[in-house]
Image (cartoon, grey):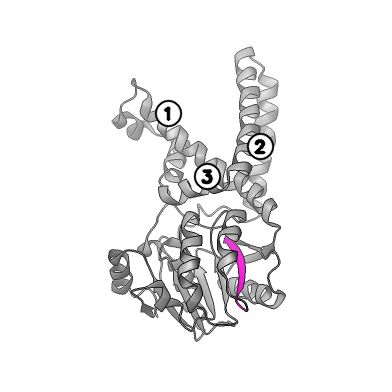
Amino acid sequence: MSYRRVALIGLGLIASSMYWAMKRTGAEVHVTGYARTAETRETARRIGLCDEVCETAEEAVQGADLVVLAVPVGAMGRVAETIAPHLKPGCTVTDVGSVKRSVMEAVGPFMPEGVHFVAAHPMAGTEHSGPESGFAQLFDNRWCLIVPGDADEAATAALETFWRSLGANTERMEVDHHDLVCAVVSHIPHLIAYTMVGVADDLARVSDQEVIKFSAAGFRDFTRIAASDPTMWRDVFLTNKQATLEILGRFTEELFALQRAIRTGDGDTLFEYFTHTREIRRGILQAGQDTSAPDFGRIKVDK
């Protein structure tokens, strides 16, 4: 691992998993951490998350070779402005947000000369949040998308090496393409999940008890996704409007086509559509991008 000192700003699922994964490598790395609330900082200290939990973000980034912004995307710019005067010359700042254009525009202007900002997005997660939700295996065989923009090549390559040391596969991607891809594979599925759970709750003829009692695997998957952190997802949709609305429009067109097929009794169309989408699902499984099994829980490693 090329970084000797790493600062984690924000101590939720991704940052805590990064810490446990770093310690799993056995590398000699000193990790500082900061969280906005005193309660989260105290929890981190209690469970041994980070080698040092700091009271301010400014203190956490002192001397760091790598600074990871693991806060909601709507807060990235504010945090970057706060820490900018305290960054070590030559260090790399990165993020873990699932939107890249808005983050790069929010963070980039605050980076001092000689500090490298390299945007990144680990495509991994669970419905759990908070410092106790992290586990070392979260990134194993998952993709971390690197969106360098015009960032320094050496800094970009070093960040790729870092993520591979945590178990991830890496691929570079152009910023707007990233936001469109993530709207398809992540953002819209979450929006649909939130909506479906809301629809079930609104149906007067179905009580909350019956929804829970009779929910099959499909609906349980919706409820799992809809349990994700609301602050994070609010910011995602507000900062990735263009791509989200474009894919949502396409989804609506597909939904109308299926609605028409059901109304007219067009079984052939439904069968062909479901057969095609089943093959896509098989491709996802073959690519190793389904983490529903095995369930590692929230496994940690000894410091």
Neighbor class of circle 1 (other Cα within 10 Å; few <14, some 14-19, many 20+) is few
- Along the horizontal axis of the image, is 108 left or right of 172? left
Magenta-highlighted residues: 114-121
Q: Which residue is mark 2?
A: 277
**Residue 167, can we see it?**
yes
User: Mark on residue 237?
Assistant: 3
Name the residue nearer the viewer: 195 or 110: 110
Q: In the rendered structure, does residue 118 fall within the stretch colored magenta?
A: yes
Amino acid under disc 2: Thr
Q: Earlier in the sequence, mark 1 or mark 3?
A: 1
Marks 1 and 3 in Cβ contact (< 8 Å)? no
- Along the horizontal axis of the image, is 168 left or right of 206? right
Q: Which residue is mark 1?
A: 199
* Residue 109 image point, x, y percent: 59, 65
Q: Nearer the viewer, mark 1 or mark 3?
A: 3
Quarter of the figure that contains the N terminus? bottom right
* Residue 32 image point, x, y percent: 42, 78
CA separation in Å, label 2 and label 3: 25 Å
User: Mark on residue 67?
Assistant: none
Disc 1 element: helix
Q: Earlier in the sequence, mark 1 or mark 2?
A: 1
Residue 39's place in the image compared with 184, above or below, is below
- Along the horizontal axis of the image, is 43 left or right of 20? left
